[in-house]
Amino acid sequence: MSGLALEDALSKHPSRGRIRAFDAAVLTLVLLALWQAIGSWTRGVAVSPPLQTLVYLFDLLRTGMFWDHAAATLTAFLVAFALSALIGLALGLIFGVQRFTGEVAEPILAGFYTIPKVTLYPVVLLIFGLGVSAKIAFGVMHGLVPMTLFTLGAVRSLPPVLIRTARVLRLSPGRTMLWVLMPACLPEIVNGLRISFSLTLLGVLIGEMFSSQRGLGFLLVSGMAQHNVPLSTAVVTVIVVVSIAANTLMLRLRGRTAQRSS
Amino acid sequence: MTRRLAALLVRIAVLAGLVATLEICCRTGIIDPLTVIPPSDMVASMIDHVGSGEFNEGIVNTFSTIVLAFVLAIGCGTLAGALIHRSLRLRDVADPLLASYYSVPTFIFYPLLVALLGLGKAPLVVLGVLSAAPAVMISTLSGLDGVSPVLLKLARVQRLSPARTLWWIVLPAALPRLFSGFKLALSYALIGVIAGEFILSGSGLGYAISFAYQSFDNRAMYGLMLFVLLAAVIANGVLYVWEGRLARRRSNG
């Protein structure tokens, strides 16, 4: 999956201290100005300007309604993410060790990764019904494959000496995975978790936007439908901030695990 | 090679087995036909609906939107990538942005785009470009990074003009990575446009599927779904094979 690997090819570049901080500040200002410009240019029919959104957001965060929706999204997301991560990790390890099975499975998984899975959402709804389980299933459909592919790739590129050593030491398959494969693949596993995190979130949110009565995705669409522009802009802001924060955290974590294992 | 062939055969057997199992489960009533219709019916329905011409407008609409978004994404992405590559300072600003770009579910901007641009082709194209262009940018950057300095020196020794250097040296050297960006861009544009039509739109294949779902027309829904998925698999498959051919030509010299 060269495509998945592309994304992290750019996360390492030497830092150039203060110029960088200055540029980052300028960038932030430019983005805020752009946001403001779009907001005032359309006179707030599509996007509310930054300051107004922020004020609205503070009020919103004090309502129970918002936290109900946020909790609905969070529950569905956490269950889906846990399932994607665990099943994906297990499948990836198995496909990585069993070479032939891996060769059979990989193109199928990679193909599934590139198709528009939204079209399958009605099937998920027909099978699981309207409710939280459909959202979870859809989240897993998005998050499982990248997790599997990353783990599979990591195991496959391990030096064969590690696996041979495990065999010489007569470790059981379970112990080999736990003591040899997992620690050796940790940086790539963290990377898989990072991609899986954002795609699972995407799946859950699309599910909520298409047909649901609860959750942030629903809140966003209903804000749009009721012409409550500050509401939808505030929800978008929350989602963007949370996902970037989570991504940054996992990039750091990956950097740390990569350092330790090298 | 034989191992690859064996894997291919087993893969086909596994997929055929899955389809056959689904067919049997549907025909014997283990799976309720109101939930999933048998695969053979899906194919029949696809041929009926697509062949009847009632969806021709939607099909043309959707695919032209996807192609437009794909072409724009490649143009903007390559250009932006090349510009950023020229300046270290811009690069420092862009790298962290690009690294976290795909963590944001771009899709949540779609309702805002609809409010901004109206319910037509425009928000779909913008959504497609928003989801595809950064992938092209990233691959352009990594492709240009991968051009070895020796080649550029060679170009200077041969006194090639900048345009010729680009055409004869840089482009061929960066092509494999560029191509993997294009491949991603196609699937992202496809996903973006169809997802947009699916959630909020008045035309196109995504809308037709969502409409069939809401009017409990399972047969039409599965037929159209199969059509969209087949189209996506074929489009991605063509680029995949092409990429393999490029790679082989390179390794042969």
Image (cartoon, coloured by chain):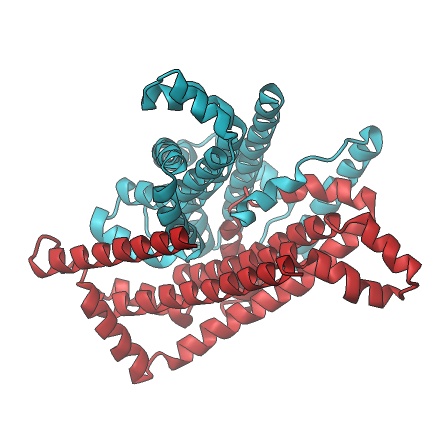
Chain colours: A cyan, B red
Residue A166 screen position, x and y as percent: 41, 20
Residue B108 screen position, x and y as percent: 50, 50
Corner quadrant of residue A196: top left
**Residue A69: in sight, yes or no?**
no
The single residue placed furthest to the top in the displayed view is A169
Q: Tell me which residue sits at (31%, 43%) in the image.
A: A137
Residue B153 screen position, x and y as percent: 88, 53
Q: Tell me which residue sits at (27%, 63%) in the image.
A: B213
Left or right, residue B208 beside residue A225: left
Q: Foreground: B100 or A42?
A: B100
Left or right, residue A251 beside residue A199: right
Q: How many marks?
A: 0
Height in image: B16 above or below A139?
Answer: below
The single residue placed furthest to the left in the displayed view is B28
Q: Foreground: A94 or A222?
A: A94
Residue B40 screen position, x and y as percent: 19, 68
Left or right, residue A84 beside residue B92: left
Left or right, residue B96 beside residue A131: right
Q: Foreground: B198 or A174?
A: A174
Height in image: B61 above or below A204?
Answer: below
Q: Quadrant of the C terminus of chain A?
A: top right
**Residue A159: in sight, yes or no?**
yes
Corner quadrant of residue B75: bottom right
Q: Tell me which residue sits at (39%, 50%) in the image.
A: B3
Height in image: A47 above or below A149?
Answer: below
Height in image: A187 above or below B166?
Answer: above
